[in-house]
């Protein structure tokens, strides 16, 4: 018999952490929608599917185009 355990944690972030979390979710949402739209356009126009690695390789150039995406970088976040 297998028993599953679960733990629930409640976090209470401070104002700085809340701002970082909101920016991170906003950037993630933007990148997801940007690439989803790109996939839809490529499929509609060329009838082919884009691979994940093709879009993954575009991320560094996206950070140069949209400078605010670099603002949320895990290495630069001070909690």
Image (cartoon, helix red, strand yellow):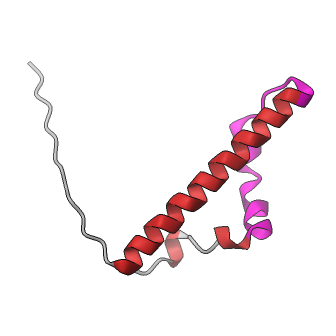
Q: Quarter-wise, where is residue 53 in the image? A: top right
Residue located 64% across and 55% down the image: 30
6 is higher (above) or lower (below) than 68 = above
67 is higher (above) or lower (below) than 40 = below
Q: Quadrant of the C terminus?
A: bottom left
Horizontally, residue 23 falls left or right of residue 14, namely right
Q: Quarter-wise, where is residue 11 in the image? A: bottom left
Q: Can residue 53 be seen?
A: no
Q: Quarter-wise, where is residue 55 in the image? A: top right
Q: How many numbered discs sit on the rendered protein?
A: 0
Residue 57 is one of the magenta-drawn residues: yes
17 is higher (above) or lower (below) than 6 = below
Dominant SS of magenta comes to helix
Please name whichever residue, 12 or 70, is drawn nearer the observer in this view of the structure.
12
Horizontally, residue 6 falls left or right of residue 37, namely left
Residue located 72% across and 66% down the image: 63
Q: Can residue 4 be seen?
A: yes
Residue that lies at the very extreme toward the right in this rendered image: 46
Residue 9 is one of the magenta-drawn residues: no
Q: Quadrant of the N terminus?
A: top left
Please name whichever residue, 22 or 61, is drawn nearer the observer in this view of the structure.
22
- Residue 69 is situated, as x and y percent measured from the top left of the image, at 65, 67
Residue that lies at the very extreme toward the top in this rendered image: 1
- Residue 22 is situated, as x and y percent measured from the top left of the image, at 47, 65
Horizontally, residue 11 falls left or right of residue 43, namely left
13 is higher (above) or lower (below) than 32 = below
* Region of the chain picked out in magenta, as a range: 45-66
- Residue 51 is situated, as x and y percent measured from the top left of the image, at 74, 34
- Residue 3 is situated, as x and y percent measured from the top left of the image, at 10, 28
């Amino acid at each position: 018999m297998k028993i599953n355990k679960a733990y629930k944690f409640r976090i209470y972030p401070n104002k700085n952490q809340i701002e970082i979390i909101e920016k991170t979710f906003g950037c993630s949402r933007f990148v997801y929608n940007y690439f989803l739209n790109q996939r839809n356009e490529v499929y509609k126009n060329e009838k082919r599917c884009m691979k994940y690695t093709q879009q993954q390789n575009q991320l560094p150039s996206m950070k140069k185009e949209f400078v605010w995406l670099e603002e949320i970088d895990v290495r630069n976040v001070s909690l």
